[in-house]
Image (cartoon, helix red, strand yellow):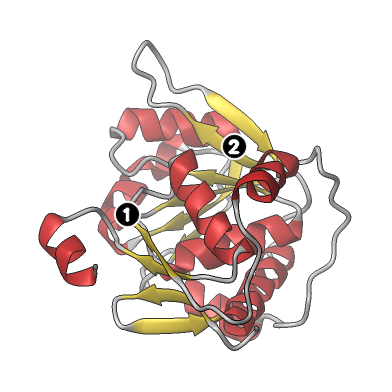
């Protein structure tokens, strides 16, 4: 059901075929920047539609997605970005100032990409996608290859990087998620942050199950009640 709604976010709707094309554009854009299988791509942003595109695009490219805790302190973010050896940092609008403050302490980051509009000294996300191919991106990926490097909260010390392979999510979905039913259209509401494994699982489950994913930037009671 490629024309079914895949994402609902702040008045925008994206079908599954549109999501797939934009994810391909992300993968091809990253390849154009020299990103290869196994390279790390970090993201500092609250939930949004680009977050979903970025994860799937990074996964298609064979690179490793590093979702950063947007509640982390600056020194914790610097540690996570450097420890992960991220070469690309995707940045949401509210974190632009912090990203610029961290630049001098992030020697491995080669490309800063602004997700929401043009920013001085950064590549523009939409411009990158506009100039990249929407054709399917193919790279050889094994089940055991790492898809996400997710960091713990670091409550007892520094945040710890937890590598998660593709099969950790595919097994979860096969065992816990009903596959798509062409006769039924359903919507899942995402309130968990996508830097958390529960948020990523909810996102993947919606896609695998052919369900629309209605997203909230962050959990807010009144917005949640209106959405429900």
Question: Which residue is at 74% across, 59% downward?
Answer: 61
Q: Nearer the viewer, residue 57 or 226?
A: 226
The residue at 32%/54% (across/down) is 191
Q: Is residue 117 visible?
A: no
187 relative to 100, above or below: below
Task: Return the mark for residue 191.
Answer: 1
- Whether residue 13 sits left or right of residue 128 in the image: it is left
Whether residue 207 is situated above or below residue 131 in the rendered picture: above
What residue is rendered at 65% in x and 83% in y? 1
Q: Which residue is mark 2?
A: 149
Residue 190 picture location, percent across and down: 37, 58
In the figure, residue 120 lies in which quadrant?
Answer: bottom left
Secondary structure beneath dot 2 equals: strand
What residue occupies the far left of the structure in this picture?
Answer: 222
Quarter holding residue 55: bottom right
Q: CA distance from mark 2 to mark 1?
A: 21 Å
Number of marks drawn:
2
**Which residue is most to the bottom?**
3
Q: Is 46 positioned to the left or the right of 5 in the image? A: left
In this view, the residue in front, 178 or 110, is 178
């Amino acid at each position: 059901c490629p024309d079914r709604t895949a994402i609902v976010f702040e008045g925008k709707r994206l079908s599954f075929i549109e999501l797939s094309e934009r994810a391909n554009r992300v993968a091809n854009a990253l390849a154009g920047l020299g990103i290869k299988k196994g390279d790390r791509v970090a993201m500092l942003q609250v939930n949004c539609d680009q977050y979903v595109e970025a994860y799937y695009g990074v996964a298609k490219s064979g690179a490793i997605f590093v979702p950063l805790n947007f509640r982390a302190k600056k020194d914790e973010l610097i540690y996570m970005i450097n420890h992960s050896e991220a070469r690309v940092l995707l940045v949401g609008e509210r974190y632009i100032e912090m990203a610029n403050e961290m630049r001098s302490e992030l020697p491995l980051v080669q490309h800063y990409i602004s997700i929401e509009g043009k920013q001085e000294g950064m590549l523009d996300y939409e411009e990158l996608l506009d100039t990249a191919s929407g054709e399917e991106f193919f790279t050889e990926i094994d089940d055991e290859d790492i898809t996400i490097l997710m960091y713990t909260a670091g409550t007892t010390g520094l945040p710890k990087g937890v590598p998660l392979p593709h099969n950790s999510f595919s097994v979860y979905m096969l065992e816990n998620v009903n596959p798509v039913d062409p006769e039924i259209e359903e919507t899942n509401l995402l309130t968990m942050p996508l830097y958390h494994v529960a948020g990523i699982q909810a996102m993947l489950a919606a896609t695998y199950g052919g369900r629309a994913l209605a997203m909230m930037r962050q959990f807010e009671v009144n917005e949640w009640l209106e959405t429900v």
